[in-house]
Amino acid sequence: MISKVTLAKTAGFCYGVKRAVDGVYGKYNEGKKIATLGPIIHNRQVIEDLQSKGIYSYSRVSDIPKDCVIVIRAHGVGEIVYNEIGKREYLDLTCPFVSKIHKIVSEHYKKGYEIIIVGDKNHPEVIGINGWCNDSATIINDTNYKIDEIFAEKDICVVAQTTINRDFFGEIVQNIKKTCKSTLIFDTICNATKDRQKEADEISRNSDTMIVIGGKESSNTRKLFEISKRNCPNSYHIETIEDLPQTKTFKKIGITAGASTPSSIIEEVVKAMSENLKNEENFAELFEQYGSKTLNNGDIVEGTVVEVRNNEVIVDLGGFKYNGQLAADQLTDDPTLKPSDVVKEGDVIKVYVVGVNDGEGKVVLSRKKVEAMESWNKIKAAYESGEILEGKIIKAVKGGVIALTDGSQVFIPARQASGRFVQDLQSLVGTTVNYKIIEIDERRRRIIGSVRVILEAARKEKEEKFWAEAEVGKRYSGTVKSLTSFGAFVDIGGVDGLVHISELSWNKIKHPSEVVKEGDVLDVYIKDLNAETKKISLGFKKMEDNPWTIAQSKINVGDVVKCKIVRMVPFGAFAEIMPSVDGLIHISQIADRRIEKPEDVLTLGEEVEAKVTDLNWDEKKISLSIRALIPVPEKEEKEEEVPAELQKAETLVYSTDPEVEVEEVIEIEPEETADAE
Ligand code: SF4
């Protein structure tokens, strides 16, 4: 008992054959006398029916009776045949896919290309194609074919017979490319054949019996039989129901049919099979699967991806006779993605039916439209609720960028594209952003989004949190956002504070850039803040880096230090002991004699040795003496005591630290110094 019958959706007439057969019957119904140039179809039953109507096939134009309309079949003919037809009435039923090849060949032949046709040289379609380059084409039907070296330097145009195997074509193309440097390849293979063979392969793998219906002369039917037999040894090639074997032992039956098999014959076979079905599945249901399902432009249906190509996706529309074609640009708005990045075989997707062309056997689909419709509703809801959406920037346009969210394109004006001014909008392309819809124009289907409003809201929230928690002394890790001559602005989490230039280093610097740069992360603390003016003063210097702290641990009274004269004043000279730590050598301590001014003995930049005579760390004052290191000449008389005023002068200490105020200088005119005579 038969348990299952599966009928291939691709069984029967392809678009080109259907168009040709319908065309002939249509002309006949107009009351015209018709003759065909070659058999219109490789199907005995159809040919017999046509003959019964007085429609015969001729191989040459000159043989066709003068009162007949000449019909050119789907295979097409060469240019010379049109010349032979001349002014006679004719009906051109060349399949448009074949006409396209004629055009390619003719154009490139006229431009000087050598034409190569991959296909069978005896096939009428190939003979017709060759007729568009003055029968000059090289016809290749063997993967071992050796291209003549003569072609190596020529411009080559390669086309394919519509019904050949794509892998076979690819292999030959590779061989051609090895020899020929300049090749234009046109993949003109018709998918109808491939789709039919693919489906036969799938069904035959899951059936214990395969019935392949079609003329014994039909090469495409024979190919289907070959494929079926390979997977399912119990395969039968039949022309009509008369040839149907005894079905009693069959269980799972698969049925397919060649491109020239009329649906009436397929219907008869399916009917015979379904009568023996043991379950409720019946003939009507089978034919529902076969293609009685109707589709209208504008329908939204679910389909299964059956093939992913470089430039399109083929979708099984479940019950509709033809598979749908989903072009790459109708799959996604994202031009950076290939079809294989978006879908894979077996995926069930919702598609919008853009157009059903029964004549061409074509269903044009769009996934973008479905997504756009669904996402429009989503976007409207997001606008009303204020929801944050995510989108990928797909292109920069005049005045802004376009973000893509679930198939909807959202315009984001330049000033709304970021929290700051973006000079090069192109740099945003490819990034993913969060944004809010700020305007919708229903009539023009225009959506305007803003990234900025989100960033500003986030910044405001951070700012409020900051001010709620900020206090003097609190430490932060901040990022330098910008530099000015007076300091560095540092982002400490949504708000900026200023690190004054004097806070950036213990040493004297002329510009903040000597110490930091934009993007640097600093450990800072709040020195002062004003919640009303929103001004924050930040501290950066660390006590352990304070040169005076370092000096305190290293310098003691009595030490002899090397120092450099950095400044001279009437009462002495300042000498740098270490960076940012200067001591004063009073004028009386510069030499062992009386001098008018420090310059009499010292020069700026000069390195000297001096003795530390006094230290006042609190006031950052260090007293130095060169004189103290000068040996006193031995004298008989007792050295005179240093006057009290001079002793006082020696203890005056000064600092170059800007925080230390310089005391008023007391000019001391010692009447006598230690070395006074
Ligand atoms: S197989 Fe393709 S090219 Fe050939 S007639 Fe059918 S539709 Fe046209």
Image (spheres, helix red, strand yellow):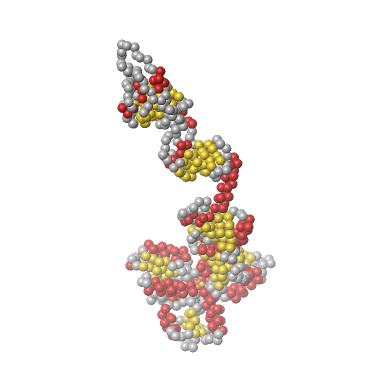
Quarter of the image for residue 232 reads bottom right
- How far across and how far down the image is residue 303, in percent? 59, 64
Whether residue 230 is visible to the viewer of this picture, yes or no, is no
Whether residue 541 is visible to the viewer of this picture, yes or no, is yes
Q: On the rendered image, what quadrant is the N terminus found in?
A: bottom right
The single residue placed furthest to the bottom in the displayed view is 67
The one of 487 and 437 positioned closer to us in this rendering = 487
Residue at left 51%, top 38%? 538
Residue at left 49%, top 59%? 399
- How far across and how far down the image is residue 266, in percent? 59, 73
Q: Is 564 situated left or right of 287 in this image?
A: left
The one of 530 and 349 positioned closer to us in this rendering = 530
**Is the residue 296 above or below the residue 423 in the image?**
below
The one of 10 and 56 positioned closer to us in this rendering = 10
The single residue placed furthest to the right in the displayed view is 280
- How far across and how far down the image is residue 641, in percent? 37, 15
Residue at left 54%, top 38%? 528
Q: On the rendered image, what quadrant is the C terminus found in?
A: top left
> Total label count?
0
Quarter of the image for residue 210 reads bottom right
The one of 647 and 544 positioned closer to us in this rendering = 647
- How far across and how far down the image is residue 219, in percent? 50, 72
Residue at left 53%, top 55%? 416
**Is the residue 619 above or below the residue 206 in the image?**
above
